[in-house]
Amino acid sequence: MSESAITQAGRPILEEHFETLPAQEEARKLGMWVFLITEILFFGGLFATYTVYRELYLPGFTQGSHFIEVKWGAINTAVLIVSSLTMALAIRSVQVGKRKGTTLGLLGITMLLGVVFLCIKFILEWRVDYLHHHVPGINFDYAGPHAAHVKLFFLFYFYMTGLHAIHVIVGIGILLALSYLTWRGRFSPKYYSPIEVAGLYWHFVDIIWIFLFPLLYLIGGR
Amino acid sequence: MSVAVAELATRSRVHYLNESYGVKSWLLTTDHKRIAILYMVSITFMFLVGACAAALMRIQLLEPAGAIVQPETYNKLFSIHGIIMVWFFLIPSIPAVLGNFLIPMMIGARDVAFPKLNLLSWYIYIIGACFILYTLIYGGVDTGWTFYTPYSSTYSNSHVFGAAAGVFIVGFSSILTGLNFIVTVHKMRAPGMTWFRLPLFIWSLYATSIVLVLATPVLAITLSLMAMERFLHIGIFNPAIGGDPLLFQHLFWFYSHPAVYIMVLPAMGVISELVAAYSRRRVYGYAFVAFSSFAIALIAFLVWGHHMFVSGQSVYAGMVFSALSFLVAIPSGIKVFNWTATLYKGSNSYDAPMLYALGFLGLFTMGGLTGLFLASLSIDVHLHDTYFVIAHFHYIMVGGSVMAYMGGLHYWWPKMTGRLYPDKWARFAAFTIFIGFNLTFFPQYILGYLGMLRRYAVYPAQFQALNVLSSAGASILGVGYFIPLVYLIWSMRYGREAGPNPWRAKGLEWETASPPPRENFEETPIVTEEAYAYPTRPRAVRV
């Protein structure tokens, strides 16, 4: 068990209940994959419910979808895809042992893009929806055709994008913590599994958005 | 594999129970064995709360007009009984107590893969339990454990939110436990512990964990949608404002039917261990028993519609769900036949854990066969929502899962505490539970067949005799559960020293000291033989 002696920034990197470092790294990765499978089912329940109602109430859902801006959804898709690229580059950077500054920079850009995504989401989209009285339970006011179904659409819109936004916020928090640890010199080509596992999570959150965008923004043929 | 640590002086030895003392050393522990004990204490408390609700229900039903409570209170009693027993006792029972304690020991690991996550899942359980207790103290919930809409989302005036929040929260505890077990079984096995050398307990808990991870998140989403409808008055499930109540039932049972297998698969794992240990034989058809767990886990996800035969789903869906439900009988039958074949001409001994195992075999078989009645469309129309259903799932949940939990607890108690309990009392309690259980629930099959509906606080006078019989049985059952509570606690201080392997059983957990040291094994074991490698008896003895 020579790995147990390896320390980084003063702390041993091998937890005591693991025999070897590769075993520990593999366990962490598998753990994250299993967690992501749970997440798929978590969002899956929502996707299924949404699909049922989209099928039942297509005119109302189309009407609702026309109230939200494809432009912002598309820009946000691009923002998240670029953030996934910088996330992957950050992992690569620590894996091949680039300077600490490079890794920190790439993690920084990733977080920044996450913040940009949230700003577009909250300030340019949700705030406008609020001003237009489109928020169910708070100020929903729409008297056109299919009003009940438009309301249902907006409920799913806010629930699904809100749940996704919570995941983005959690992701930014994780990256913030990892940036601190990177700055403290905790990671090296020998030991970087926390960054890699966080990367899995970040990519997953992107993929959820890739499904949300067409589901919510691109219905009703426009 | 030698029993090297057998003769260690136990009194002065440092083990997981005496390595540190104080509340903090327990509340901040990451030791899977201590977390198992924390779970055991918590679920026992919740079991007592749920049992009190059941006792009040049985007293109420002594008289046709209801003996003690108003119908509204009765609704709250069966709701809280169901919610607590399903989510706060049965689902965590075998996985979080016995699984937590045993999985690392059985595979030769020092701990589960993520010990901190393991502790976190206990805290999440406690937070969920607090919500339930809050609900109970502030007036209870009356929706039944199923939270059917639109009653729960629109009409109920009880504390639906507290109860649903508790269930929502405790789900994450289950998910994290399942995640931990999956990774532990994959990545933490000792050298030589191949998949086909794993004890069958591990196989069944692995299958359980998959169901936990896949099904539980759907329940969380479903309950959150129900809560949104309740607060925001948006027609998600309420047809009066544009929703679809059937969709709630689909989503709810997509989780809650697999949840039945979350509760019974671990029990099957325990029974495999008990049957092998007390017949001193390798479980007959090891691979079949192992894979039947996966078959059950898979089919679990395909049969939820059999809860909705009379809910207005399409007749064709009903027919498909009915046919698929029959499939469950195949892997379940494989298990029961293989256990029976193991017992046949085995060197059987009838210690208390074995009595529980035999009780399981009979009661589970009966519960399973009556499940086939209910899976048949035409019969279900007659039996749906009657006491026949109540009796059926109590035969599975109590006759199956609780019997197995009790058997497992008795079997591994010496390992957990280092002490033996008085065997005569234990056997007496096992018999009492078996008799009390059958007296309680067998009359309910007849009541249900005669047409007595579930969830009513009153009933026609002609059903009184059978109801009194059932309530009398419940009191015997209560005594049966009380006796082990007394002698198990007694044994922790006054019981005989158990030694590492009091049952002369096979398995890595029996090769280390009792109670085990913090790191489970003095050194990492190397596995060289199959599970249940009991010596085969010479042929001549048998002839």
Image: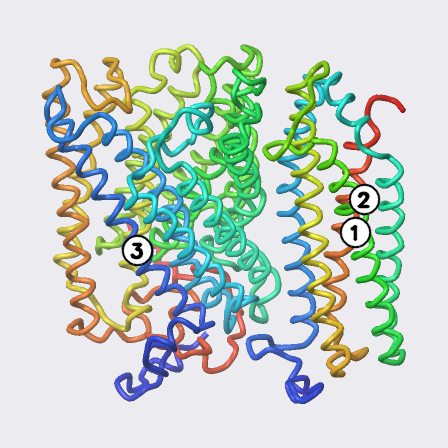
Percent position of residue A12, x then y: 64, 84
Residue placed most toward the observer, B220 or B258: B220
- Chain letter of mark 2 equals A
Residue under label 2, please give it: A124
Percent position of residue A176, x then y: 73, 68
The type of residue carrying mark 1 is: Cys
Please give the name of the residue rendered at 55% of the width and 32% of the height, measured from the top-left corner.
Answer: B232
Hey, which quadrant is residue A163 in on the image? top right
Q: Earlier in the sequence, mark 1 or mark 2?
A: 1
Residue under label 1, please give it: A119
The type of residue carrying mark 2 is: Leu
Give the side of residue B287 with respect to residue A95, left or right.
left
Please give the name of the residue rendered at 63% of the width and 41% of the height, measured from the top-left corner.
Answer: A41
Whole-angstrom CA distance, mark 3 to mark 1, is: 65 Å
Percent position of residue B312, x then y: 50, 13
Residues at circles 1 and 2 in contact by the CB criterion of under 8 Å: yes
Residue under label 3, please give it: B278
Give the SS element for disc 2: helix
Q: Height in image: B240 above or below B219?
A: above
